Image (tube, rainbow, N blue to C red):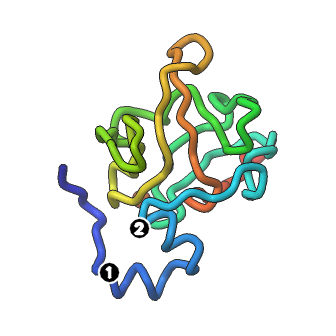
Amino acid sequence: MSFDKTKTDAEWRAELSPEQYRILREHGTEPAFTGEFWDNHEAGEYLCAACGEPLFESDTKFDSGTGWPSFYQALNADAVAEKHDVSHGMERVEALCRHCGSHLGHVFPDGPAPTGLRFCINSASLSFKKKQD
Ligand code: FE
């Protein structure tokens, strides 16, 4: 898998907060119900916190009850990459930013219609751009 907005590890360390670095670049996870966006209901677009590319729209966000921002689909086919992940003794699908390769969260097959998917994403991996009226 190749990404068009990669940076060196030193650059990522300089640009991201320690918490963002841990999650985006070291595949970390924020504790449930602690992030900035799990309970955000405003209309707008969610961008990659590392590279700024748009990843998800608020229209596809739903309340999963998990304490992490959850979406039933990515913005488009070029937004999110999926990778088989067998770390931590679990078989999962990892969600990565298609542009910079940063870790976003995981994709589970228990989401709502129309896709049946649940993109379970760390708030720390996202920034939010509120829709202009
Ligand atoms: Fe990115």
Q: Amino acid at mark 1?
A: Asp
Determine whether, in the image, residue 28 is placed left or right of residue 5. right
Please state the horizontal and vertical placement of residue 33, each as a whole percent of the image: 78, 50
The circle on residue 25 is 2
Please state the horizontal and vertical placement of residue 100, each as a whole percent of the image: 34, 60
Please state the horizontal and vertical placement of residue 128, each as a whole percent of the image: 66, 55
How crowded pointer 1 is (Cα within 10 Å; few <14, some 14-19, many 20+) is rated as: few
Q: CA distance from mark 2 to mark 1?
A: 8 Å
| Residue depicted at 18% across the width and 54% down the height | 2
Please state the horizontal and vertical placement of residue 64, each as a whole percent of the image: 71, 30
Name the quadrant where ligand 1 sits: bottom left
Mark 2: secondary structure: helix
How crowded pointer 2 is (Cα within 10 Å; few <14, some 14-19, many 20+) is rated as: some
Quick one: which residue is furthest to the front in this view?
89
Mark 1: secondary structure: helix
Closer-to-camera residue (66/59): 66
Determine whether, in the image, residue 115 is placed left or right of residue 59. left
| Residue depicted at 41% across the width and 67% down the height | 25
Quick one: which residue is furthest to the top in this view?
113
| Residue depicted at 67% across the width and 43% down the height | 69
According to the picture, the residue beneath numbered tag 1 turns out to be 9
